[in-house]
Amino acid sequence: MLNNKIPPVIVVLFFAGIMALIAHYSVIDFTAFITYLAASLVTIGCVFCIAGVVSFKIANTTVNPNKPEQASKLITSGIYRISRNPMYVGFAFILAGWGIWLSSLWALLCIIGFIAYLTFFQIIPEERALTKLFGEEFTAYKARVKRWL
């Protein structure tokens, strides 16, 4: 059973809001480079998220992060060769882009909180469920592919 009852997308929005509050009080004026860097990070994040969802849809398995026991297949190809959690990696890139856009190094520190929260309350419980469901196949996959990047 998962420890987290809050959908990861809500967690992303929560941390984005915290970042905006912090940035409001710590804005640093940079050049147009910030816009391009922020857009690039958000784009990379979206690619990771979309690739993860598409891989699940192609395999005809659940995308619902709160119901890992409903997974019908362990996905280890495509973007899942790079990260066991590409959608969460994508969210972290999106938050990094948001932090850059806000021009706040302090707001960027919220990404550490996001990663820690998701690791302990979402990913670790998901991995327990997937180990029960897929056994040695998932254990071998964990040994070859990193959790984040």
Image: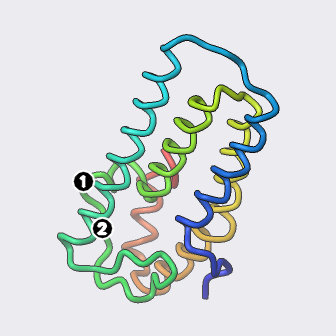
Quadrant in which the N terminus appears: bottom right
In the image, residue 92 above or below residue 61? above
Disc sitting over residue 75 in the figure: 2
Disc sitting over residue 4 in the figure: none
Residue at 72% across, 37% down: 107
Is residue 8 left or right of 69 when viewed as pictured?
Answer: right
Residues 6 and 4: in front is: 6
Instruction: Look at the numbered discs 1 and 2 and tell me whether their residues touch, using CB distance below 8 Å.
Output: yes
Please rate how many residues cluster around mark 1, counting C-alpha atoms within 10 Å: few if below 14, some from 14 to 19, many from 20. few
What secondary structure is marked by label 1?
helix
Structural distance between the alpha carbons of marks 1 and 2? 8 Å
Residue at 43% across, 86% down: 133
Indicate the position of residue 92 as horizontal and vertical percent values.
54, 47
Indicate the position of residue 136 as horizontal and vertical percent values.
41, 76
Residues 7 and 133: in front is: 7
Q: Amino acid at mark 1?
A: Gly
Is residue 93 left or right of 5 when viewed as pictured?
Answer: left
Q: Amino acid at mark 2?
A: Ile
What secondary structure is marked by label 2?
loop
Q: Residue furthest right?
A: 25
Indicate the position of residue 68 as horizontal and vertical percent values.
45, 81
Q: State the colouring used for the structure image.
A: rainbow
Disc sitting over residue 78 in the figure: 1
In the image, residue 21 above or below residue 38? below
Counting every numbered tag in the picture gives 2
Q: Residue furthest front?
A: 24
Residues 44 and 149: in front is: 44
Residue at 49% across, 79% down: 131
